[in-house]
Structure formats: structure tokens, C-alpha cells
Image: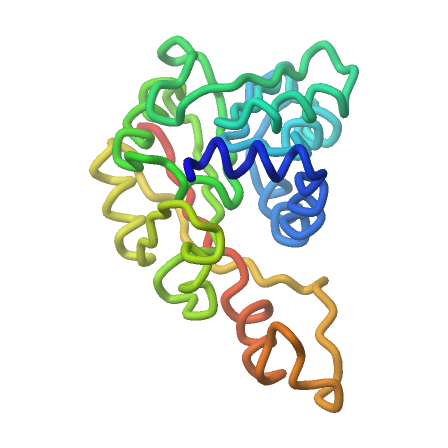
């Protein structure tokens, strides 16, 4: 199944809202760190339900917010969740962004970058559309050091790119970005039940669950266009 077909099905089933709820725990502090100034143009790459684009308009006063997703159904749902005329959702491919060069001030992506069919090309495209001094805040939970994520590709049933922290830094630099920072953003909000309730359906031990959410959390890599 293609990425588009997979997430069309998710959106049709209403699972886009579930994705938003799960991702918000670490997306929220990442969005707060973005240096978006009032009136600037932002892009949410792999926008899903559109929560990040809406949040950047509401909390950062972005002048224009775009959300781009490969799934037509995700885009359809996202459009229905807002009546803000300055928030626009588009269907498109990560490797061929429908924006002019130097037209975007900042880009955010949460749990989507690894679905790019050619992640190196996606980074080059972002380098093209971002203005000098623009930033790309890339958050992923699926990465090499997070051993608890390694089975996700087979569970979802689509091809995914699993890079290490170092591979993310190298790829950003090869595409023309300076790597401003890279760290782990822990999920402090997911409820972790007491040891007496383990094992659970999803976790064999409480220690593993604590490690997944409190230690690994979301890997954040921040690139800046020179």
C-alpha cells in the first residue's frame, strides 16, 4: 500500500484526530521554540489534521500558514477544521514542493518526514523554498536510536526511512542547511501506569515504556538556511 492510500484510509476512519492527540505532547514544545515572527509565512510538512498550521497562526501570529500532505483525505479533513482564510491546506509531494524559491520563512514537520520517498530530495526542496535565515524544525519518533520504534514500518505497512541522529545531521548539511541544534524532546504528558498494571497489551515492562516516552521522546533536528 502507498503512503497516500494508507493515510487516506486513516483520515476516512477519523484517525487523523487520534494522530493529533498523540503527537501534540511533543509537538507543542517544539512549536513554541520556533522563531516565528508576526506576519511570517510557515509551512507544516505532512500536516495531517492541520493542528500545527492552526497553532502557528494562533500562538505565533504567522501571517500565512500552509499545510501540505500527500493524502487527499487528510487535506479534506484539515480544511474542514478551520475557517481561517490565512490557513491553506494542499495535497502534494514532499519531493516537489508547490512553492516559489525563498517564499517560506519557517517549516515544521512532525512524524512525517520519514515517509518521504526521497528524503534527500525533500531536504533540497526545503532549502530551495525557505528564505535565507529560515528554519526547518523536524521532529521524528521513528529513528535508529529509538529501539522501541523499529517495528513501526511493518505495522504501518508502508516504506519508511529510519535514520540515526548522525544521519539526520549529515543529510541536513548535505542539502545546504546549518544544523542549529539537535536534541530529544521527552513526552511528559503520556500517562505511564504503575508497575502493578504491567505487562500491558503494548508494553512488556514499565521500564520500556518510561524509556520510550521520557528518554527517547521525539528526536528534533533544526536546520537553518544560510
Looking at the rendering, which quadrant does residue 199 occupy? Answer: bottom right
**Which residue of the protein is positioned furthest toward the front in this rendering?**
1
Is 226 located above or below residue 172 in the figure?
above
Residue 143: x and y, percent? 39, 58
- Residue at 61%, 46% (x, y): give it: 27
Using the image as rendered, state which of residue 66 and residue 200 is in the foreground.
200
- Residue at 63%, 83% (x, y): give it: 206
- Residue at 24%, 40% (x, y): give it: 173
Is 43 located above or below residue 165 in the figure?
above
Using the image as rendered, state which of residue 207 and residue 62 is in the foreground.
207
- Can residue 183 be seen at all in this image of the molecule? no
Q: State how the image is colored.
A: rainbow
- Residue at 68%, 86% (x, y): give it: 198
Looking at the rendering, which quadrant does residue 138 occupy? Answer: top left
Residue 84: x and y, percent? 76, 15
Is 93 located above or below residue 118 in the figure?
above
- Can residue 135 be seen at all in this image of the molecule? yes
Q: On the rendered image, what quadrant is the N terminus found in?
A: top left
Amino acid at each position: 500500500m502507498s503512503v497516500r492510500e494508507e493515510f487516506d484510509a486513516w483520515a476516512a476512519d477519523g484517525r487523523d484526530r487520534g494522530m493529533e492527540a498523540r503527537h501534540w505532547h511533543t509537538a507543542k514544545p517544539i512549536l513554541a521554540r520556533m522563531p516565528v515572527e508576526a506576519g511570517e509565512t510557515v509551512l507544516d510538512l505532512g500536516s495531517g489534521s492541520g493542528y500545527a498550521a492552526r497553532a502557528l497562526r494562533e500562538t505565533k501570529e504567522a501571517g500565512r500558514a500552509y499545510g501540505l500532505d500527500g493524502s487527499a483525505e487528510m487535506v479534506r479533513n484539515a480544511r474542514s477544521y478551520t475557517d481561517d482564510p490565512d490557513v491553506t491546506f494542499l495535497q502534494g509531494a514532499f519531493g516537489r514542493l508547490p512553492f516559489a524559491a525563498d517564499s517560506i520563512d519557517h517549516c515544521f514537520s512532525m512524524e512525517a518526514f520519514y515517509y518521504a520517498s526521497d528524503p534527500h530530495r525533500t531536504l533540497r526542496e526545503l532549502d530551495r523554498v525557505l528564505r535565507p535565515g529560515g528554519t526547518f524544525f523536524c521532529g521524528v519518533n521513528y529513528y535508529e536510536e529509538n529501539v522501541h520504534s523499529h517495528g513501526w514500518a511493518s505495522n504501518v505497512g508502508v516504506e519508511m526511512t529510519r535514520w540515526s541522529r548522525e544521519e539526520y545531521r549529515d543529510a541536513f548539511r548535505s542539502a545546504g542547511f546549518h544544523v542549529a541544534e539537535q536534541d530529544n524532546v521527552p513526552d511528559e504528558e503520556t500517562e505511564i501506569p504503575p508497575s502493578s498494571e504491567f505487562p500491558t497489551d503494548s508494553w512488556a515492562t514499565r521500564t520500556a515504556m518510561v524509556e520510550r516516552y521520557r528518554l527517547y521522546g521525539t528526536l528534533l533536528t533544526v536546520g537553518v538556511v544560510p
